Image: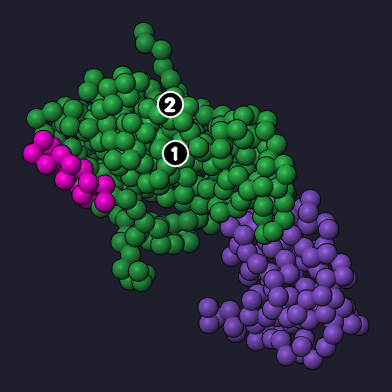
Amino acid sequence: MSDQDLKLTPLYDAHVAAGARMVPFAGYSMPVQYKDGVLKEHLWTREHAGLFDVSHMGQARLRGEDPLAAFETLVPGDYAGLKPGKQKYSVLLNAEGGIIDDLMAGRPDDDGLFIVVNGACKDNDYAIIASALAGRASVERLEDRALLALQGPEAAAVLAAHVPAVADMAFMDIAALPAFGVDAIISRSGYTGEDGYEISVPAEAARRVWDALLSDERVRPIGLGARDSLRLEAGLPLYGHDLDESVSPIEAGLGFAVSKKRREARSFPGADRIAGEVEGGLNRVRVALKVEGAPAREGAEIADETGAVVGRVTSGGFSPSLGAPIAIGFAPPAFSALGTALKVIVRGRTQSAEVVSTPFVPHRYVRKMKA
Amino acid sequence: MRFTKDHEWVVLEGDVATFGITAYAAEQLGDVVFVETPDAGKAVKAGDNVAVVESVKAASDVYAPVSGEVLEGNAALGDAPETVNDQPEGAGWFAKIKVADKAEIEALMDRAAYEAYLQTL
């Protein structure tokens, strides 16, 4: 794809004006970093609040007579009882229980299900959903909406100054509400491990909302480079790297997204494989590694202490918060226990690595007790 | 100081060439978090991968600007890779090479030619 064919988000001009370095990503021209650079942007988000343009992601409404029941036929989570105001993370599964995409699906209101999917996967996702649910539910792409993420320990105070109602939301709450003079859909969630929000607004309001949030000195614009290092520290998988159509949610450590009730009922695609894996039939699992020496990046081999290759890194890099290299990869369960000593092979050299728990950096989600 | 199209600089003293990456390259890479320099004794040809410099998001090869034998890598970059950003054309040097053919260096760009080259990128 030539640069001329790249799509632009409604915030393209704002990125260029802010000195962003633009790169092709998921068919869009996106900011990989601004003037501060990845390291400073990463640390700013951990300490203050970072503003991200994630308008390349797919936003859609699923509507029908019973859209929750229809949606459940494609994913392993419990959606039938999902109350308005809540969203859940899930995975779209193929017939073999492999992950077609990972997504958020929620009920900001009574208007069906609002879903947010990966930008690079969205056309395929919508085609699969529309085809599988033909006659039961329809997919309406919300192409005229932008998506912003405000993430970090100061995000709540910043956003509440504009939209007071968001202060009362808890992690994974979602609401359709008037904000910035338009109809917004706001969830308290994100992809950094920090407290924060994802804010969907009509495209024509995006620049105004972006500028309003950036006018707060606690907020800086953050590019996709830091988005990737933040999510890696948070232990959150990235589709196309840690997840693909061969990987099941159990292998990927996403068992929390597989409902026990639905697994026992075998009521989603690939349920037989996934049930077998839950009962112990696993050949590989996701492992988190702390690495000594050079960063072990995607594709680096993981070896046991004798040097025999047992797996591969699927995401890896340097953790700005820890000041050390970290990685996510896949290896047989026998090598997945915390503290297991492993090796990674970087440019032909063998380096030490240790299996650690995720997240690498603690999550700071705001979970509220019921009054 | 001479420059390559791959954004390395090189300075010759006697028959010892000290090289590193240019300020332009350091700026493009962003914050350097890891540097791998060559071991003494390694024989290199101009254009060989001789070192690696890594930012948060990517690893990049550094090519030998001249042929010869590595005398030493800059061990100080192991603990302080950020020196490459702070002083790319000084304390952030990568390695010293005992040069086989000084004519290789004379064939490289001078600063004016390198800056003109940067304008074409």
Q: Residue at x 37, y 11 (%)?
A: A370
Does A85 appear above or below B20? above
Q: Is residue A287 visible?
A: yes
The image quadrant of residue B44 is bottom right
Asked if the stretch drawn in magenta spans residue B52, the answer is no
Does A196 appear above or below B2? above
Question: Could you say which chain is coloured green in the image?
Answer: A
Mark identifier at residue A191: 1
Question: Could you say which chain is coloured purple in the image?
Answer: B
Say which element carries label 2.
helix
Segment colored magenta = A124-148
Q: For the N terminus of chain A, which image quadrant?
A: bottom left
Identify residue type, mark 1: Tyr
- Mark 2 falls within which chain? A
Measured from the top left, where is residue A58 in percent x and y? 28, 47
Measured from the top left, where is residue B22 in percent x and y? 68, 71
Nearest the eye: B69 or A58: B69
* Left or right: residue A259 compared with residue A140: right
Q: Which residue is mark 2?
A: A278
Residue density around tag 2, few if under 14, some if 14–19, many if 20 or more, within 10 Å = some
Q: Residue at x 50, y 37 (%)?
A: A283
How many marks do you count on the picture? 2
Q: Which comes sooner in the sequence, label 1 or label 2?
A: 1
Q: Residue at x 66, y 39 (%)?
A: A290
Colour treatment of the image: by chain
Nearest the eye: A275 or A369: A275
